Image (spheres, grey):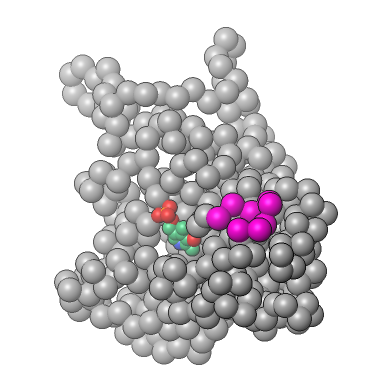
Amino acid sequence: MTNPYSPISRLLHHRTQRISKGEPAALPIIASSTFHQPGDPDGTHFYGRNGNPTVEEVEEEIGIIEDADVVLFPSGMSAIASVFYAHLRPGDRMLVHSDGYYNARALLAAQLEPMGVHVQAVATADFAAADFTGVKLALIETPSNPGLDVCDIAAVAAKAKSAGTILVADNTTASPLCQRPLDLGADISVMADTKAMAGHSDILAGHVASRNGALMAPVRTWRRLAGAVVSPFDAYLLHRGLETLELRVARANANAMAIATALSGDPRVSGLRYPGLAGDPAHAVARRQMKGYGPIVSFCLESREAAEGFIERHPLAAAATSFGGVHSSAECRIRWGDRVPAGFIRFACGVEPVADLVAATLAALDKP
Ligand SMILES: *Cc1c(COP(=O)(O)O)cnc(C)c1O
């Protein structure tokens, strides 16, 4: 019988519905690099780089959420790298966001461009108007991290499809509970599971998802040959995080919306961005394609010094990079060379009670 319930319910009972009497209800960590495999290989497990039962269980769980085939990686960057190395060859043309996660562009500049891949950067907000003629692959990121611009995934996908371009969407900022790039026409969705999916700031992980087997086969081959495999211990922690994904995402989104609402119109703050705010330039497109607007709010204070003071005074925000964890965190993105004003803060909401986080944020804005 097919299960009519939501992906989260099916994820939670993926294991309980299949185990036999006496087996552990919790996911076992199978810590083994090698497996009993006498004689000729018979398709069962034989070596950790080729497959591990704990890792495969977590791939199936994420596959339920994505409604797609999923390959797990030890970081978001290795997931992105697998797509580049699986699908780009010398002479190919590709488009990449100019304002999304900087390491994707850094990888292209350091490794793929010297091998003869032609890379053109396009601003997230301009992607639907970009020229896809002769483009092999395009990587979009919406909402973009950290500027929070968006592009219309369905419109970009229509252009990519008619040009024969493989459209890859980095869905880390939103997470698949808030936005479903594969449903909107993207060929491949990539994510840093380091962020909301694992959700506790204790592991790095990433995944590639697609409903197109021909696009996934070379990704799987690259992982096996390059050896970019996640450990079963980290896969277990990701599984543990996934079990509370919906609860954490709902609270973090509520926190972000409440903070954005509290800061809008506040004279101490400029350049406030949150795609969930009705007045945000990204809101019209975001509302069409997102079910929730994610945990990140960005805004500027008048200087780097003012921004660092705010972060230092904030009692409920860790001074740390990354997002999607249970603790709120904040940082000045200029320290990583992002093209943002000196006083630009990326505020990443955790799961603190909403009233506490809003009160603490407003209080930290007051100069001592
Ligand atoms: C963090 C992040 C990545 C990279 O993930 P790692 O696990 O740190 O390698 C990629 N894309 C986006 C949008 C991210 O926020």
User: Picture quarter containing residue 359?
Assistant: bottom right
| Nearer-the-camera pick, 255 or 332 | 332
- Name the residue rendered at 51%, 35% in the picture: 237
Q: Position of residue 176 (x, y in %)?
A: 60, 56
Residue 11 magenta-highlighted: no
Quarter of the figure with the C terminus: bottom right
Answer with the quadrant where ligand 1 appears in the image: bottom left
| Nearer-the-camera pick, 25 or 120 | 120
Q: Is residue 90 above or below residue 48?
A: below
Quarter of the figure with the N terminus: top right
- Name the residue rendered at 47%, 83% in the picture: 123
Q: Position of residue 40 (x, y in %)?
A: 19, 23
In the image, is 277 to the left or to the right of 305?
right
Q: Is residue 167 visible?
A: no
| Nearer-the-camera pick, 111 or 288 | 111
Q: Is residue 164 above or below residue 103?
A: below
Q: Position of residue 142 (x, y in %)?
A: 55, 71
Residue 317 magenta-highlighted: yes
Residue at the limit of the structure toward the top, as seen here: 22
Q: Position of residue 276 (x, y in %)?
A: 72, 71
Q: Is residue 85 visible?
A: yes
Q: Which residues are magenta?
A: 312-319
